[in-house]
Image: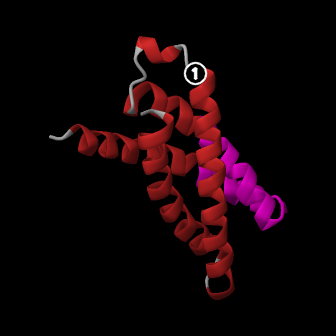
Amino acid sequence: MHTGTIQFVKYGLVGVVNTAVTFCSFMALSAAGISLDWANLWSYVAGIVCSFVLNRCWTFKAQSSQRRHTTRQALWFGVGAALCWLVQWGVFRAVLPVAEHWLAYLAGMVVYTVANFFFNKFITFR
Protein backbone atom coordinates (compact mmCIF):
# COMPACT_ATOMS: atom_id res chain seq x y z
CA MET A 1 0.00 0.00 0.00
CA HIS A 2 1.23 3.51 -0.84
CA THR A 3 2.76 5.52 2.03
CA GLY A 4 0.30 8.37 1.50
CA THR A 5 -2.62 5.95 1.70
CA ILE A 6 -1.28 4.39 4.92
CA GLN A 7 -0.81 7.85 6.40
CA PHE A 8 -4.36 8.84 5.46
CA VAL A 9 -5.75 5.68 7.08
CA LYS A 10 -3.71 6.32 10.25
CA TYR A 11 -4.81 9.96 10.17
CA GLY A 12 -8.39 8.73 9.95
CA LEU A 13 -7.94 6.46 12.96
CA VAL A 14 -6.38 9.29 14.95
CA GLY A 15 -9.29 11.36 13.72
CA VAL A 16 -11.74 8.95 15.33
CA VAL A 17 -10.07 9.48 18.70
CA ASN A 18 -9.68 13.21 18.08
CA THR A 19 -13.31 13.49 16.94
CA ALA A 20 -14.53 11.75 20.07
CA VAL A 21 -12.51 14.13 22.26
CA THR A 22 -13.65 17.17 20.27
CA PHE A 23 -17.33 16.22 19.93
CA CYS A 24 -17.72 15.09 23.55
CA SER A 25 -16.05 18.29 24.72
CA PHE A 26 -18.39 20.36 22.53
CA MET A 27 -21.49 18.58 23.78
CA ALA A 28 -20.38 18.88 27.43
CA LEU A 29 -19.48 22.55 27.12
CA SER A 30 -22.68 23.46 25.27
CA ALA A 31 -24.75 21.45 27.79
CA ALA A 32 -23.02 23.40 30.56
CA GLY A 33 -24.36 26.62 29.06
CA ILE A 34 -21.21 27.79 27.26
CA SER A 35 -22.12 29.65 24.06
CA LEU A 36 -21.98 27.51 20.92
CA ASP A 37 -19.12 29.53 19.44
CA TRP A 38 -16.97 29.27 22.60
CA ALA A 39 -17.82 25.60 23.03
CA ASN A 40 -16.79 25.08 19.40
CA LEU A 41 -13.46 26.85 19.93
CA TRP A 42 -12.48 25.17 23.22
CA SER A 43 -13.49 21.71 22.06
CA TYR A 44 -11.23 22.13 19.04
CA VAL A 45 -8.35 23.18 21.29
CA ALA A 46 -8.75 19.92 23.24
CA GLY A 47 -8.89 17.92 20.02
CA ILE A 48 -5.91 19.73 18.49
CA VAL A 49 -3.65 18.85 21.42
CA CYS A 50 -4.71 15.20 21.18
CA SER A 51 -4.26 15.23 17.41
CA PHE A 52 -0.76 16.75 17.46
CA VAL A 53 0.61 14.17 19.86
CA LEU A 54 -0.91 11.17 18.06
CA ASN A 55 -0.18 12.37 14.53
CA ARG A 56 3.39 13.38 15.29
CA CYS A 57 4.27 10.11 16.98
CA TRP A 58 2.23 7.64 14.94
CA THR A 59 0.74 8.93 11.67
CA PHE A 60 3.68 10.91 10.34
CA LYS A 61 6.29 9.24 12.61
CA ALA A 62 8.61 12.13 13.27
CA GLN A 63 12.09 10.66 12.95
CA SER A 64 14.77 11.28 15.57
CA SER A 65 16.31 13.94 13.30
CA GLN A 66 12.91 15.65 13.19
CA ARG A 67 12.40 15.49 16.94
CA ARG A 68 14.65 18.51 17.30
CA HIS A 69 12.05 20.40 15.36
CA THR A 70 9.18 19.78 17.77
CA THR A 71 8.66 23.49 18.39
CA ARG A 72 8.57 24.26 14.67
CA GLN A 73 6.17 21.40 14.06
CA ALA A 74 3.96 22.44 16.95
CA LEU A 75 3.82 26.00 15.60
CA TRP A 76 2.93 24.87 12.07
CA PHE A 77 0.44 22.39 13.49
CA GLY A 78 -1.17 25.24 15.42
CA VAL A 79 -1.24 27.51 12.37
CA GLY A 80 -2.82 24.76 10.27
CA ALA A 81 -5.31 23.94 12.98
CA ALA A 82 -6.27 27.60 13.32
CA LEU A 83 -6.73 28.07 9.57
CA CYS A 84 -8.72 24.85 9.23
CA TRP A 85 -10.76 25.75 12.32
CA LEU A 86 -11.72 29.07 10.70
CA VAL A 87 -12.89 27.23 7.59
CA GLN A 88 -14.88 24.70 9.63
CA TRP A 89 -16.35 27.50 11.75
CA GLY A 90 -17.60 29.13 8.54
CA VAL A 91 -19.24 25.85 7.55
CA PHE A 92 -20.64 25.43 11.09
CA ARG A 93 -22.18 28.92 11.03
CA ALA A 94 -23.52 28.41 7.48
CA VAL A 95 -25.23 25.12 8.35
CA LEU A 96 -26.43 26.16 11.83
CA PRO A 97 -29.53 28.10 10.65
CA VAL A 98 -30.87 25.05 8.81
CA ALA A 99 -29.81 22.15 11.05
CA GLU A 100 -29.43 21.10 14.67
CA HIS A 101 -26.26 22.42 16.29
CA TRP A 102 -24.67 18.97 16.54
CA LEU A 103 -25.27 18.30 12.83
CA ALA A 104 -23.80 21.68 11.85
CA TYR A 105 -20.82 20.84 14.05
CA LEU A 106 -20.31 17.48 12.34
CA ALA A 107 -20.46 19.11 8.89
CA GLY A 108 -17.69 21.48 9.94
CA MET A 109 -15.65 18.60 11.32
CA VAL A 110 -15.64 16.82 7.96
CA VAL A 111 -14.27 19.90 6.21
CA TYR A 112 -11.71 20.45 8.97
CA THR A 113 -10.46 16.86 8.83
CA VAL A 114 -9.75 16.80 5.10
CA ALA A 115 -8.15 20.26 5.01
CA ASN A 116 -6.04 19.57 8.09
CA PHE A 117 -4.70 16.26 6.75
CA PHE A 118 -3.29 17.93 3.66
CA PHE A 119 -1.88 20.85 5.64
CA ASN A 120 -0.07 18.50 8.03
CA LYS A 121 1.15 16.13 5.34
CA PHE A 122 2.60 18.82 3.10
CA ILE A 123 3.59 21.54 5.58
CA THR A 124 3.82 20.47 9.23
CA PHE A 125 5.35 16.99 8.95
CA ARG A 126 6.81 17.10 5.41
Q: With 79 as the anchor, is 31 left or right in this view?
A: right
Magenta residues span 22-49
Horizontal and vertical percent for residue 63? 40, 17
Taking the image as drawn, is residue 65 in sight? yes
* 27 lies above or below 75: below
Which residue is at 46% across, 34% downward? Answer: 55
Task: Name the residue tied to disc 1.
Answer: 70
Taking depth in this image into account, of 114 and 103 the one nearest to the observer is 114
Taking depth in this image into account, of 31 and 100 the one nearest to the observer is 100
Which residue is at 41% across, 41% downward? Answer: 121
Local SS, label 1: helix
Horizontal and vertical percent for residue 125? 45, 33
Type of colouring = secondary structure
Q: Is residue 39 magenta?
A: yes
Horizontal and vertical percent for residue 2? 18, 41
* 65 lies above or below 2: above
Q: Which quadrant is home to the N terminus?
A: top left
Q: With 15 as the anchor, is 8 left or right in this view?
A: left
Magenta region's main secondary structure? Answer: helix
Q: With 102 as the anchor, is 111 left or right in this view?
A: left
Which residue is at 81% across, 58% downward? Answer: 32
Taking the image as drawn, is residue 31 in sight? no
Horizontal and vertical percent for residue 118? 43, 50
Query: How many residues crowd around disc 1 within 10 Å: few (fewer than 14), some, or many (20 or more)?
Result: few
Q: Is residue 107 magenta?
A: no
Which residue is at 54% across, 67% downward? Answer: 106
- Quarter-wise, where is residue 84 in the image? bottom right
* 104 lies above or below 58: below
The amino acid pointed to by label 1 is Thr
Q: Which quadrant is home to the C terminus?
A: top left
- Quarter-wise, where is residue 41 in the image? bottom right
